């Protein structure tokens, strides 16, 4: 340990101060102590610059949360770990929202304290600071950018607090991967993790998929079947595309969140379960609440804590790592030699905005590996036409190419994209903007339609059309 590492320890119990100080000084940390929040703030205001603060939650006068809030204003970069003799979920969540890095319940062992300090001070981040963190088969997490390191730190903290977590982000940003990370870092890691895509399962089957059914509950139900919640008891369930769940099922899910119990279809008996619920969506939350697509009471239940994944265009530091990892994985999967990622290709990938995020990048590498043509792969990205960074994914009116000076391939691709955008717009208008019906009409998957709506900026065009019509 380095003598230069300065830790400020704040606790109103003299015995606890002595105990923790002894644990820290064994490892040669320089320890400053304060017995109240006011004293700690005064020390910092007078020039004390701790690398880390261990802060008790319950203290007379200014309590730990108030002290935390003021500390973060005075020293925004300081790492703060909260200490408490009780595991109060509400206070843990509040501390996380105020910027605490971690939470320790007293009494704790030296090994627990060491682990928390190492993580906060960056001594054990090799697994995810620019490296690939394996979660399970073909699932990995990368946090090479400041934004993703913050997400990873928040995930590690919230994983130990048994509350629902809402995962937000554009399609393809890795919300399922983040859900698996939360599960892996939680006390439920050795239990079942299940994902249910609420958009992929027809509405009339989703209830039986989640809650199961008894024999005779409906035509064809010849024997009882447990639902995902039963199968996932003691584990974690990820409800993907939660915004696509029918309102009647949202009410039943709310009951599970509140009481941890439900009934199978066709049954009057109640089943109690202990399931950690994670929910993911890429919908516009305010709009979904305003249109009653998402129940407000369910949203506030799910939103005990939110992790918002940034799009790939906002964390481009990770693109080289992701490219190399996808290439290595897919070369092994398809029994091919990995292809080189030249500086020219790397530059093209860094200049491209990746409206489909990690999913698009993965498919790009797959095509490059199979076709083996670097020039064709770079032409596919066509970075010159994407001069405004994230415009395409944010709803700009590009169709993905620049027809001027791009040659025959560029003209062909531009015409194809324009035709696709027109066909999708017509299908949406024909179905009164019912995206599931439009996807069926176009004979493409629902997720493919969502991706193309964002790619071509059709959602924004729709909004503009409504404003024009009402003017």
Image: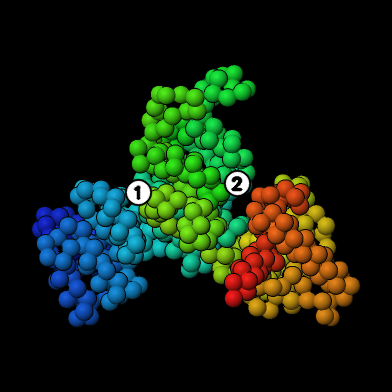
Q: Is residue 360 above or below residue 48?
A: above
Pinpoint residue 53: horizontal percent, then vertical percent: 26, 65
State the residue lying farthest toward the right.
Answer: 408
Q: Quadrant of residue 70?
A: bottom left
Label total for image: 2
Which label number is shown at residue 199? 2
Q: Residue tagged by mark 1?
A: 161
Q: Which residue is depicted at the point 18% across and 63% down?
A: 63
If the image is split into quadrants, where does the N terminus sit? bottom left
Pinpoint residue 382: horizontal percent, then vertical percent: 76, 72
Which label number is shown at residue 361? none
Q: Is residue 6 above or below residue 11?
A: below
- Which numbered mark, 1 or 2, is in the foreground of this view? 2
Q: Which residue is depicted at the point 61% across and 40% down?
A: 201
If the image is split into quadrants, where does the C terminus sit? bottom right
- Crowding at label 1, few (<14), some or many (≥20) Cα neighbours within 10 Å? some
Q: Which residue is depicted at the point 47% across and 34% down?
A: 229
Of the numbered discs 1 and 2, the one sitting upstream in the chain is 1
Res 215 visible: yes
Q: Quadrant of residue 42?
A: bottom left
Q: Which residue is depicted at the point 66% across and 50% down?
A: 436
In the foreground, 444 or 337: 444
- Crowding at label 2, few (<14), some or many (≥20) Cα neighbours within 10 Å? some
Res 362 visible: no
Left or right of residue 176, residue 407 in this image: right
Pinpoint residue 103: horizontal percent, then vertical percent: 30, 55
Pinpoint residue 203: horizontal percent, then vertical percent: 59, 40
Find numbered disc 2 in the image and state the secondary structure of the residue it sits on.
Answer: loop
Find numbered disc 1 in the image and state the secondary structure of the residue it sits on.
Answer: loop
């Amino acid at each position: 340990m380095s003598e230069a590492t300065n830790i400020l320890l704040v606790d109103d119990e003299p015995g606890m101060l002595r105990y923790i100080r002894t644990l820290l000084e064994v490892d040669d940390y320089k320890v400053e102590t304060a017995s109240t929040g006011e004293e700690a703030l005064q020390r910092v205001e007078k020039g004390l610059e701790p690398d880390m603060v261990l802060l008790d939650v319950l203290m007379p006068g200014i309590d730990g949360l108030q002290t935390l809030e003021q500390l973060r204003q005075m020293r925004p970069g300081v790492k703060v770990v909260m200490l408490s003799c009780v595991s109060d979920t509400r206070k843990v969540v509040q501390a996380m929202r105020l910027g605490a890095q971690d939470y320790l319940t007293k009494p704790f062992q030296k090994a627990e304290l060491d682990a928390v300090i190492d993580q906060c001070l960056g001594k054990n981040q090799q697994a995810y600071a620019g490296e690939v963190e394996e979660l399970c088969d073909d699932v990995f997490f990368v946090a090479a950018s400041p934004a993703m390191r913050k997400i990873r730190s928040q995930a590690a903290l919230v994983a130990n607090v048994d509350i629902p977590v809402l995962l937000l982000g554009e399609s393809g940003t890795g919300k399922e991967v983040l859900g698996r990370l939360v599960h892996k870092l939680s006390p439920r890691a050795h239990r079942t993790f299940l994902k249910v895509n609420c958009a992929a399962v027809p509405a009339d089957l989703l209830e039986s998929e989640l809650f199961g059914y008894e024999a005779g509950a409906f035509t064809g139900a010849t024997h009882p079947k447990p639902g995902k919640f039963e199968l996932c008891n003691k584990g974690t369930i990820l409800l993907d595309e939660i915004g696509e769940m029918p309102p009647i099922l949202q009410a039943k899910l709310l009951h599970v969140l509140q009481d941890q119990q439900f009934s199978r279809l066709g049954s009057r008996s109640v089943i109690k379960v202990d399931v950690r619920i994670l929910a993911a969506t890429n919908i516009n939350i305010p709009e979904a609440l305003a249109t009653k697509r998402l129940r407000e009471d369910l949203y506030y239940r799910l939103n005990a804590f939110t992790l918002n994944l940034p799009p790939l265009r906002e964390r481009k530091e990770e693109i080289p790592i992701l490219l190399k990892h996808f290439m290595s994985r897919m070369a092994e999967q398809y029994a091919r030699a990995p292809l080189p990622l030249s500086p020219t290709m790397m530059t093209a990938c860094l200049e491209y905005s990746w409206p489909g995020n990690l999913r698009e990048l993965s498919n790009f590498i797959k095509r490059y590996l199979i076709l083996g043509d670097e020039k064709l792969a770079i032409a596919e990205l066509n970075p010159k036409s994407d001069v405004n960074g994230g415009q395409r994914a944010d709803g700009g009116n590009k169709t993905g190419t620049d027809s001027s000076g791009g040659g025959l391939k560029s003209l062909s691709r531009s015409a194809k994209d324009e035709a696709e955008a027109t066909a999708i717009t017509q299908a949406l208008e024909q179905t009164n903007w019912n995206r599931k019906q439009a996807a069926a009409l176009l004979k493409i998957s629902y997720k493919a339609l969502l991706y193309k709506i964002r790619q071509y900026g059709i959602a924004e065009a729709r909004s503009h059309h409504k404003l024009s019509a009402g003017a």
